[in-house]
Image: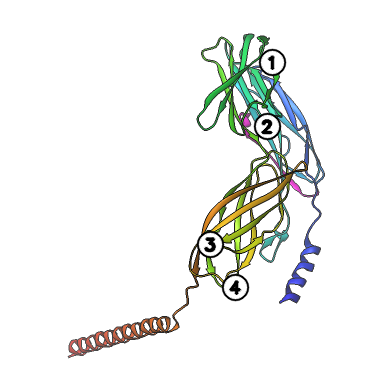
Amino acid sequence: MWKKIFIVLIISLFLIKWVYALGIVPAIIEEDFTPNLEKEIIYRVSDTNKEIKIYAQGDLAEYVKFNKEKLDGRGEFIATLKLPAEIKPGRNRIFIVVEEVIEEDEEVIGSVIGTSVTIKGVIDINMPFPGKYLEISLESHDANIGETVDFELEIISWGKEDVTVAPEIEILSLPDQKHIETLQFKNREIKSRETIKLGKSLDTSKYNAGNYRAVATVDYGGDKPAKAESDFRIGELIINIVNYTRQIIIKDFQPFNIEIESRWNNEIDGVYARVFIFNESEILTDFKTSSNSLIPWERKNITGFFDTNNFDKGFYKANITLFYYGKDVGKSSSKLVEIEFIKEKKINILLITGIVLGIIILVVIAWILIKKSRQKNGRKTKDKKLQNNF
């Protein structure tokens, strides 16, 4: 068996072709709309030795023509853009797609060895709205208590008229969405088709750890203000016990799993748990789990093993204590839980044997009845044929 696998791997290594990094230049082109615009764009495809097919997708794709539909490896092609007299307002995005073609002989033992790579160039055609019109987006980042949360507000003026904006960011707690504070920006003018990016920082020293929402509102004198939202988290050096093994079979060594979750925006090292299981009067056993690290906000299982043979059926108390380090600061947290020990369910061989034999007997009886029924129907058919002959 292993010899066959080794031979297949060796053959596959010889059949696999070099993987090239397919690229297209230019990657992005941006144009302001002009009625009946005609434009030729020369594209260069690099770093491939495969056949390439070329096509367009997205808004206004029907207004793009190519001088070639395929390329035999790297090379150049021309995309000719012929726009109509009118298009919809806003950003109209066209994708210029180049896609590698996989040959049939690249299929080996039922699996495709070659990899088809697709790359897209972008053509953005911008058409302003009549009057005033804004689009905004808001980005935020997680932080720990005492650090700053940085916001980036992007404002794009898609209207034909210049606007004066009054941006602000409201901070809400989650899940109750209670207002906490509002961050103000100074008023400013934005020209038609202009894009600006504004930054703001939030001091979290007076905040509690938890989940929050930032709501950006930009009033610009339009029908209604432009709005955008972004959720963020403020962390603290703590690990929560999310779940744990609640039922254990009494049989030799058994695993004890603890699901933990980081509530910190940095890596936490050396995370392990020590578990004490006891009754009302004494500690019956204690053990440690494996040691792990947690990336920011990660949820993970850690596992320990212990001997269950000295336990009787019933409920026991357990103390789970977590130990961990973050930025050279050691911490611990504990949780008191209840665990049920149960006896192993033994398989009743006699009962299973009886059930299997019963099923077999029923199948045999059904088969005999069906056979007799067919034989009876066969005799009736023969009798009818004889009567018809006479």
Where is 309 relative to 269, above or below? below
> Which quarter of the rendered picture does the C terminus lie within?
bottom left
Q: Which of the marked residues, 3 or 4, is nearer the chain's N terminus?
A: 4
Label 2: which secondary element: loop
Question: Of the numbered discs in the image, which one, if any, rests on residue 145?
Answer: 2
Identify the residue under disc 1.
194
Label 3 – label 1 distance at C-alpha: 71 Å
> Which quarter of the rendered picture does the N terminus lie within?
bottom right
Residue type beneath disc 4: Asp
In this rendering, which labeled residue sits more in front, label 3 or label 2? 3
Q: Mark yes or no: residue 42 visible.
A: yes
In this rendering, which labeled residue sits more in front, label 1 or label 2? 2
Q: Which of the marked residues, 4 or 2, is nearer the chain's N terminus?
A: 2
Residue type beneath disc 3: Asn
Quarter of the image for residue 348 reads bottom left
Identify the residue under disc 3.
279
Residue type beneath disc 2: Ile
Judge left or right: residue 236 versus residue 222. Answer: right
Q: Which of the marked residues, 1 or 4, is nearer the chain's N terminus?
A: 1
Q: Which of the marked residues, 1 or 2, is nearer the chain's N terminus?
A: 2
Mark 4 neighbour density, 10 Å: few (under 14) some (14–19) many (20 or more)? few
Judge left or right: residue 28 versus residue 377. Answer: right
Label 1 – label 4 distance at C-alpha: 71 Å
Q: Which of the marked residues, 3 or 2, is nearer the chain's N terminus?
A: 2
Q: Which of the marked residues, 3 or 1, is nearer the chain's N terminus?
A: 1
Identify the residue under disc 4.
252
